[in-house]
Image (cartoon, grey):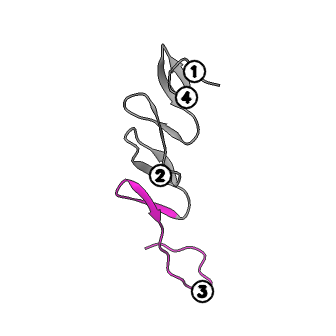
C-alpha cells in the first residue's frame, strides 16, 4: 500500500507530503523516508538512534554492542 507521495517507502501521505514510512525507514525532517540503521529500534528525524534493540546501547547517536562481563551464572549486569 503506497501513498500519493513520490517516495516508494512512504506508507501514508497528506496532500502529497509523506507522514509515515514503511517498517525499517524513518521520516526525516524533509518528509521523505530514509533507511534506518537495522540495530536501531527508533530514530529521530536526522537518523540518530534514540533506542536500540536488546544487547545494544545508544552511544554517539548510534547503537553499539553492550559489553557485559563474562561472569558465570550472571543473568543480568548493570554498571
Q: CA distance from mark 4 to mark 2?
A: 25 Å
Sequence order check, earlier mark of 4 and 2: 4
Sequence order check, earlier mark of 4 and 3: 4
Q: Magenta region: which residues?
A: 56-79
User: Would you name the residue on which mark 2 appears?
Assistant: 51
Dot 1 lies on which element?
A: loop
Could you tell me what secondary structure mostly forms the magenta stretch?
Answer: loop
Sequence order check, earlier mark of 3 and 1: 1
Badge 3, how many Cα within 10 Å: few under 14, some, many 20+? few
User: Would you name the residue on which mark 4 appears?
Assistant: 8
Foreground pick, 73 / 55: 55
User: Would you name the residue on which mark 1 appears?
Assistant: 3
User: Would you name the residue on which mark 3 appears?
Assistant: 72
Say how many tags the image has.
4
Badge 1, how many Cα within 10 Å: few under 14, some, many 20+? many
Q: CA distance from mark 3 to mark 2?
A: 28 Å
Q: Residue at x 37, y 53 (%)?
A: 61
Dot 4 lies on which element?
A: loop
Q: Could you tell me which quadrant the C terminus lies in?
A: bottom left
Q: Could you tell me which quadrant the N terminus lies in?
A: top right
Q: CA distance from mark 1 to mark 4?
A: 8 Å
Q: CA distance from mark 4 to mark 3?
A: 49 Å
Q: Name which quarter of the figure residue 9 lies in.
A: top right
Tell me: 33 left or right of 75: left
Badge 4, how many Cα within 10 Å: few under 14, some, many 20+? some
Please identify, in this view, whether the residue under mark 3 or under mark 1 is nearer the observer. Answer: 1
Amino acid at each position: 500500500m503506497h501513498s500519493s507521495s513520490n517516495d516508494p517507502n512512504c506508507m501514508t501521505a497528506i496532500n502529497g507530503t509523506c507522514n509515515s514510512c514503511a517498517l525499517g525507514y524513518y521520516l526525516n525532517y524533509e518528509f521523505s523516508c530514509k533507511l534506518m540503521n537495522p540495530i536501531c529500534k527508533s530514530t529521530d528525524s536526522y537518523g540518530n538512534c534514540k533506542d536500540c534493540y536488546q544487547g545494544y546501547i545508544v552511544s554517539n547517536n548510534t547503537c553499539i554492542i553492550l559489553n557485559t562481563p563474562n561472569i558465570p551464572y550472571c543473568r543480568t549486569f548493570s554498571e
